Image (cartoon, coloured by chain):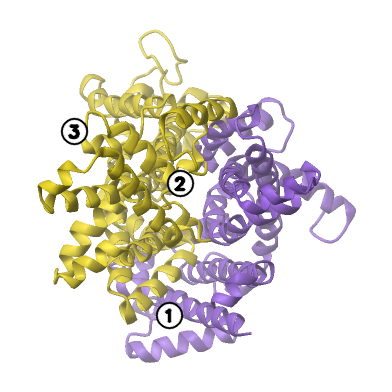
Amino acid sequence: MRYIARKLGFYAVALWGALTVNFLLPRMLPGNPVDILVAKLSARGPVTDELRDSLELLLGGAPDQGILEQYWVYLVGIFTGNLGISITYYPVPVVEIIGQALPWTLVMIGIGTLLAFIVGVALGMLAGWKRGSWLDNLVPVTTMFQAVPYFWLALVLLYILSVGLGAFPVSGGYNYNVAQPGFTWDFVGTAIYHGTLPALTIVISSFGGWLLGMRNMMVSTLSEDYIVTAEAKGLRPMRIMTAYAARNAVLPSVAGFAISLGFVVSGSIVTEQVFSYPGIGSTLLQAVNNSDYALMQGLFLVITLAVLGANLIVDLLYGVIDPRTRANG
Amino acid sequence: MAHESSRTVDDAETASGDAAATVPTSGRTEKEIIFSDLEVPATASTNMALRKNSASPLTATFAAVRTNPPKKAPRWRSVLPPMTPKLATGLILIAAIVLFGVLGPVFLGNPRSIRDIGRTPPGGEFLLGTTQTGQDVLAQLAHATQGSLLIGLVVGVLALILSMIFGVIGSYVGGWLDESFSLFTNIMLVIPGLPLVIVISSYVEDKTIWVLAVVLAITSWAASARVLRSVTLSLRSRDYVAAARVSGEKSWRIIVVEILPNLIPVLASQFVLAIIAAILAEAGLSYLGLGASGTFTWGTMLFQAQNGFALTLGTWWWFVPPGILIAVLGGALSLVNFAIDEVVNPKLRTTTLRKDKKRLKKRLHTTTEGGVPV
């Protein structure tokens, strides 16, 4: 119980930190959102003072308010689900836009990441078990894959498989001609068809890391005394590998899974851009290109929340599968 | 680690006078083994980061056996990773890319000059072909290599300094400073980096390469700070650090003289990782069009290729080379990192089983204390 409370406490503090960063960034950095917007608008025509005032109100940066008052309004806004109004899709609320983009990213990246983890850990287990075998010698090659930038691999796969062979669609999340979003078989089919290549790039470029980590832990675990005992008892090798060695060796990988989620989200933002995938990443970029600060802040908040939430789940799970963490507090 | 600790024993012996010099060499070996055996329980922890640091008695034995007859083998050699084919490959690849980045821009022409021979395939006058506007891809690649290497190096150094401040100092001093540093590190670790960089860079107008480097460094030091913290925590409880403290050494001196030298392999490995991460992050950011303005990097090349419809027009020679260079450099750096890791943690050595047996046999013949576990 104390373990859970400690973890919840930490994530509460982390959440507060992220919220504060999100609040302070536009106020600390030199560029003023309103000025940037006015500069952009003035290219199209004269900007009146009234327009400028209304922009300031829209962006929540009322200059006559003190910074603490602004901070309070901001916090209250977040907990009541009010993230402001998007300029790009004026006058749609930011929450609504995020709600449309989030499922795409969650499903595609979630499946891709999980697959990469499972494939990597399974291969790492085998490579560590048979140290020096052909599979083990392939380990450096797979880490080479890891050094390849996500998005470049996506570009190359897109070029070969979609532009060249026509095996996969070039862009988008689903085919507008086949079906409209909804829970119909047609739609799910086209969504899977469009999501395969982006997910595949995530699997290819990230399973190498899991493989290496698992392999190294397997090698360390195999030299433990309880493995020798298990062998001496005459247990089948299969059982020693899975129930004795792998079960203990996988623990750091599970812990690493939480930390890696941040990187996965980062990598997939760029990947989404390559495939013009209608997820969080391409929406964030759209917001950046249109100087849509409310949308940008909202998206950053959601991404942070998602990563924090996933971390919390993994941490709690870790407490269940490894009792030592609970004992040490 | 083991080498460093045996160094301390060595020094203590020489300091204690000539009596130490007359001690038979086998006695010294035994002493070293006992010393390093004592250390193992302190480091053999469940933490993976700590494990990196754990020195097996094996290294001590090897070091001792190797240095016994000539006695004055250069000490620094034992700290360097042995020259394996993997390490050699990595170093050669890195050297080749660095040379290309340093010398290429001098000899190859202006990467911006436009010609009326757009999208010429590789070969002939332009080894890697030309872009949509007839710019020489090879010249662009050379300038981009320089830019990316510069970013990687600067961010690597900055991230290393930050992680040392938050990882080493905090955990050495302990108390509330350690608590708060550690909390801050953990928070920075869970806040996703690239979205933060994207948001920050969208607020900053006229980004130079230096601003970009600072932003990337601020968002990337946390992971290595955590590793450094756990290693330092195990180091500060060692006997020789306690001895230094008791003898009245100042804190900064203990950190610099007693702790930092033992952190060098870990620092080197973290530095290599930071460079890879920085180059990848910069490439991603520039590919999105948020990179430094007016500078060539591998990422900006990919961005321009994307904007020049390289994908749909089939101009593969424009976007393939930068990615290959990123991958090769990243792969080479991780090969070097493997070599460093194998120094820190001998268990990871990827010798084949056959070689292991051979070595075991050899060792049984050479040492009298054959009972050291593998």
Say whether residue A172 is visible: no
Callout in the foreground (1, 2) = 2
Tell me, yes or no, if residue A3 can be seen here: yes
Extreme residue toward the top, this view: B124
Q: Which residue is mark 1?
A: A54
The chain painted yellow is B
**Label 3 – label 1 distance at C-alpha:** 79 Å
Kind of residue at badge 2? Gly
Co-location on one chain, circles 1 and 2 = no
Q: Residue at x 27, y 25 (%)?
A: B99
Q: Amino acid at mark 3?
A: Lys
Q: Which of the marked residues, 3 or 2, is nearer the chain's N terminus?
A: 3
- Count of number-bearing discs: 3
- Dot 2 corresponds to which residue? B284
Question: Quarter of the image holding residue B150?
Answer: top left
| Location of residue B83 in the rendering, given as x and y in whole percent from the top left corner | 36, 27
- Type of amino acid at the residue the image marks with label 1: Ser
SS at badge 2: helix
Q: Which residue is mark 3?
A: B72
CB contact under 8 Å: marks 3 and 1: no
Q: What element does badge 3 sit on? A: loop
Q: CA distance from mark 3 to mark 2?
A: 50 Å
